Amino acid sequence: MDRGKILVVDDESRMRKLVRDFLVKNHYEVLEAVDGEEALELFFSQKDIVLVVLDVMMPKMDGWQVCREIRAGSKVPVIMLTARSDERDELQGFSLGVDEYITKPFSPKILVARIEAILRRTGRAAEEEVLSCGGIRLDKSAHLVQIDGESVELSYKEFELLTYFMENKGIALSRERILNHVWNYDYFGDARTIDTHVKKLRSKMGQKGELIKTIWGMGYKLEEEK
């Protein structure tokens, strides 16, 4: 089974073949481009590319410009390849949003290992943006909550409170701990204000509000349905 589609951009056919062979061996699908213009045509025509391996020095359009164009509309991971080990090049690459910087010559095995590490990291980050528990789906980046497929309108603090509960489901949380995390130490009132917010949150959650259990004398815990 293919693990994802990777675009390899380099004007040297030998280098493209070397990288392609190792990626294919590790079950990646590979697209190839010989210059920057072809790279952009492929990138924007193929919507499922998971990572770009991009040479710096190429005809028609260099790797820096290709990276700028990609970053203008996409966060797909980019690994830059260069024949020079120059600190200014590396700083320029990172300022453009490059995820990794590899100097030629390099070990193809190391390249594959770095690709896999980046994909694990970016994949995990994307997954962590969406939390789910007992029919509740919370999208942190979109600031949306759905319960059994129906959208629920929450205030900012209610959303932050539910996020904290879902990130710590099954864990008993004291009122002080909740206050410190959700209010970021900038609220100096009675910690019992948590009770008021939890009451409102439970009400908006309907039957799912029962998943937020009261731990008497301490605080609260979100428990998934059994």
Image (cartoon, rainbow, N blue to C red):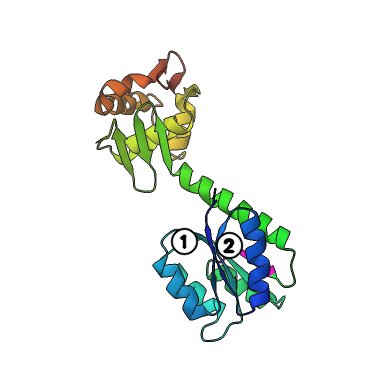
Q: Nearer the viewer, residue 121 or 87?
A: 121
Q: Position of residue 215 (x, y in %)?
A: 44, 15
What residue span does the magenta drawing correspond to?
98-102
The residue wearing badge 1 is 75
Quadrant position of residue 100: bottom right
Tag count: 2
Residue type at tag 1: Lys
Q: Residue at x 48, y 77 (%)?
A: 38
The answer to whether one can see residue 188 in this image is no
- Where residue 139 appears, as percent x and y from the top left, is 37, 42
| Up/down of 126 relative to 61, above or below | above
Could you tell me which residue is drawn at 57 percent across and 50 percent down? 121
- Residue type at the position of mark 2: Asp
Q: Earlier in the sequence, mark 1 or mark 2?
A: 1
- For the residue pair 193 and 6, the one nearer the viewer reads as 6
Can residue 160 be seen here?
A: yes
Gap in angstroms between the C-alphas marked 1 and 2: 10 Å
Q: Is residue 211 found inside the magenta-colored segment of the image?
A: no
Residue 151 at x, y percent in the picture: 25, 37
Category of crowding for the residue at label 2, using alpha-carbon neighbours closer than 10 angstroms: few (below 14), some (14–19), many (at least 20): some
For residue 112, above or below residue 203: below
Q: Residues within 10 Å of mark 1 (few under 14, many from 20)?
A: some
Q: Secondary structure at mark 1?
A: loop
Choose top left, top right, bottom left or bottom right for residue 114.
Answer: bottom right
Mark seen at residue 99: 2
Callouts 1 and 2 close, C-beta under 8 Å: no
Taking the image as shown, residue 53 lies to the left or right of residue 87, namely left
Question: Where does residue 140 sit, x and y in percent of width and height?
Answer: 39, 44
State left or right for residue 176 relative to residue 18: left
